[in-house]
Amino acid sequence: MINITEYGDRDAKKVLIYLTTEDDEESVNNVLELIGKDANESFCLAAYMIHDWNKELSPWPAPAVFGKEDFGDGAADTLKKILNYCTDTTKTYYIGGYSLAGLFALWAAYNSVIFKGVAAVSPSMWFPNFDTYMEEHEIKTGNVYLSLGDREEKTKNPIMATVGNKIKKAHTLLESKGVNCTFKLNEGNHFKDVDIRTAKGYIWLINHQQ
């Protein structure tokens, strides 16, 4: 069973995979409405509901950096389930998410050619060794949207404080590879305007992808 709920125009040729939590339908509807205001084409928002955030979205195991919950290695299984959904060859698929889901979306584009673009919104670029992973592998999409809050790196947690430098490094790397990549700096910390920031990422993919 594929845990995906479709919103918007189900017949649209552009499908936006959105990784979110199972109890966040209000947020999904907010993102749907915001995208609809500025997107220049019809779209289907396919919300993939995550049950275990740290496990299902992590590309490899890592120790906890806040709280006590370690990160698992369930990303490969999550990607497999998403790809089982992305089977209509007449449609164009994009993938995105916020925080760790944004990191997963970026990682997914290194592991599948199916995604036309990625919206990595305030992604967890501090995730151990992910910057090295990007340097050692080739991304398989041509369009990447990156964003971050201007206060996200201003944290007492030394690992999470690296997020600013690492996302800027990622932006430079992707551009050097010829990827159509943009980086937007938003006002506020990690928890400010989540729905608005997420919608902006998808709008850019719809309107500015190459």
Image (tube, grey):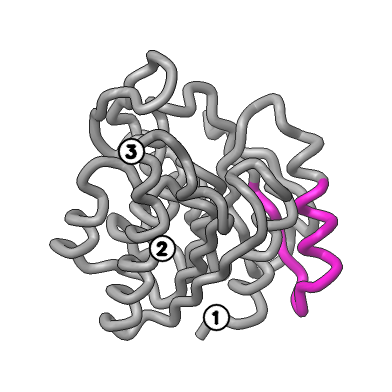
Asked if the residue at tag 2 contacts the one at tag 1, i.e. Cβ–Cβ closer than 8 Å, the answer is no
Question: Nearer the N terminus, badge 3 or badge 2?
Answer: 2
State the SS at label 3. loop
Query: Front-most of 193 and 151?
Result: 151
Viewed as shown, does residue 57 lie left or right of 72? right
Indicate which label's residue lies in the foreground, 1 or 2. Answer: 1
Disc 3 or 1, which lies upstream in sequence?
3
Secondary structure state at the residue bearing disc 2: loop
Please name the residue shown 38% across and 71% down the image. 171
Seen in the picture, residue 159 relative to 137 is either above or below; the reply is above
Q: Is residue 35 magenta?
A: yes
Tag 2 residue = 114
Question: What is the CA distance from the residue labelled 1 to the residue labelled 2?
Answer: 15 Å
**Can you identify the residue that label 3 sits on?**
158
Residue 153 at least partly seen: yes
Pointer 1 residue:
209
Residue span colored magenta: 30-46
| Image-quadrant location for residue 149 | bottom right
- Place of residue 34 in the rendered image (x, y in percent of width and height, measured from the top left): 81, 59
Label 3 is placed on what type of residue?
A: Pro
Whether residue 83 is visible = no
User: Which is nearer the eye, 69 or 90?
Assistant: 69
